[in-house]
Amino acid sequence: MGSPLYQKVIDTIVARIAAGELLPGGMLPSETQLAGETGVSQGTARKALMMLEQHGILRREQGRGTFVTARTPDSSLFNFFRLRERNGEVIRPELIDERLCQRPATDIERATLQGAPQTVIEINRVRSLQGVASAIETAVVPADLFSGIERRAPLPSALYVLYQQAYGCIVLHADETIVAIAAGPEEAKILEIGEGTPLLQVERLARDILGRTIERRHSIYRTDRLGYMVTLD
Amino acid sequence: MGSPLYQKVIDTIVARIAAGELLPGGMLPSETQLAGETGVSQGTARKALMMLEQHGILRREQGRGTFVTARTPDSSLFNFFRLRERNGEVIRPELIDERLCQRPATDIERATLQGAPQTVIEINRVRSLQGVASAIETAVVPADLFSGIERRAPLPSALYVLYQQAYGCIVLHADETIVAIAAGPEEAKILEIGEGTPLLQVERLARDILGRTIERRHSIYRTDRLGYMVTLD
DNA sequence: GAGTGGTCTAGACCACTTT
DNA sequence: AAGTGGTCTAGACCACTCC
């Protein structure tokens, strides 16, 4: 094998997390223990741990230990819900409507979602921000990967916490395409705005810790008082 | 001093780059040389170099050496111009109009831009994408930091390359706020669209290698055929 | 072949947290 | 006091690039 030793250590840790042996929030063995288990030196185990920390998979605290990053409602909100007040403050969205349905996957869903699923679950939700209906979200996930999710309704506000806790899918990364659209009759009615009002449309592909695309999400936001904040580097 | 040794190494390298002693694209001394110069071990110098590589400030190539990241027109386009075709392909924008003016800074500009400038340069440009006027950009920079920039008109398409090559400001990071707006009479005329057409408005604060906010940028995009692509993690 | 970064080891000491 | 991660060192060997 041409891969470095630390990569093997990384792979075993990621596999253990994905398999549920290491639970989010749980503590890993110490550097020396891990080194012994995997047959490498402490420095090499350390390198693996530091790389996983930088990927956001682990959290390390001096004097305490190394822990699996838990996707809490707060961290999920902060990382993957990008609507902010104009001054940058985080907003707590409120769920005001939710519908789930199971349906055949479209071609593009089959082509992009993990496992090329024949069937998907579609989750339609409307969120209210500061008392104003402001977001229409449609999440689509493979039915086989998230079997039984429809029986868990009503779902928590932060879906990614559910994905992690109930299905072991830790969402770490998302690619988004943002465009401006005019409100159609549907959106106008739900958001209580005039037809033609400019809205932000965000298409998201979310990937989990294993790099699998596990969700397609289509969101529409009112941005008359709020802004969608992102970072480039 | 309570700071680790590698931080000192990082600081000296960043200072040398900011001072123009190390030019973008230029090669740094080898790990062992750098270790000797700064009085640390090779491993410590290595750690500093790796951290700078992860911040995008350096680029390391096995067998060749370590180089200062050069902001080329291509890399600048790729990193900081996020309009893409719907399939994700990069687009080369064309400059079709440019105006510069010098004016007093507004309160918010003085509060956010490096050095609390009294005077700023405003750069207004219109870009065409695939033959269609599609972007109206307004960049505002401190006049003292970019003195004489008005005499360089017409400016290159990639402003960040100019900032780097002529003024030593290496832009590495940007925070953006995105909202949907309706085209007003001005935008409608320039972009040859109907008033009220939904447009994407992006407000950007760009920071350089020293963490200084050196540019405020206000961009308006047609997104009827293109999309603004970003990544979250 | 000489010089570069990439990997790996073994061990030392420090700072912090917990008991 | 014991255990954890954080820093630092010194040295080895490998893979790659360039001459």
Image (cartoon, coloured by chain):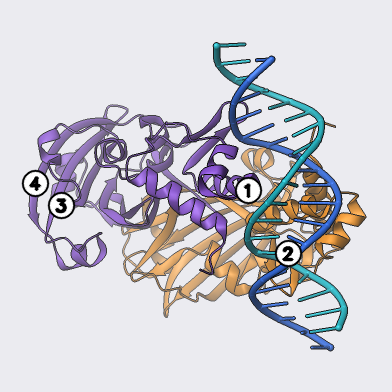
Chain colours: A orange, B purple, C blue, D cyan
User: On the rendered image, what quadrant is the N terminus of chain A found in?
Assistant: top right
Residue where numbered disc 3 is placed? B144
**Rendering coords of residue A220 (x, y %):** 45, 59
Residue where numbered disc 1 is placed? B41
Q: Earlier in the sequence, mark 4 or mark 1?
A: 1
Q: CA distance from mark 1 to mark 2?
A: 42 Å
Q: Is residue A138 above or below residue A177?
A: below
| Mark 3, other Cα within 10 Å: few <14 / some 14–19 / many ≥20 | some
The amino acid marked with disc number 4 is: Cys
On whether disc 1 and disc 3 are found on a single subunit, the reply is yes
Callout 3 secondary element: loop
Residue where numbered disc 4 is placed? B101
Residue where numbered disc 2 is placed? A164
Residue A178 in sight in this render = no
The amino acid marked with disc number 2 is: Gln
Is A174 in front, or is D13?
Answer: D13
Callout 1 secondary element: loop
Instruction: Identify which residue is drawn at 56% across, 58% down.
Output: B5
Instruction: Identify which residue is drawn at 71% across, 53% down.
Output: A209
Callout 4 secondary element: strand
Instruction: Identify which residue is drawn at 57% across, 62% down.
Output: B4
Q: CA distance from mark 4 to mark 3?
A: 14 Å
Chain for mark 1? Answer: B
Q: CA distance from mark 1 to mark 3?
A: 40 Å
> Badges 1 and 3: C-beta atoms under 8 Å apart?
no
Q: CA distance from mark 2 to mark 3?
A: 51 Å
Q: Quadrant of residue C11?
A: bottom right
On whether disc 2 and disc 3 are found on a single subunit, the reply is no
Q: Nearer the viewer, mark 1 or mark 3?
A: 1
Q: Nearer the viewer, mark 4 or mark 3?
A: 3
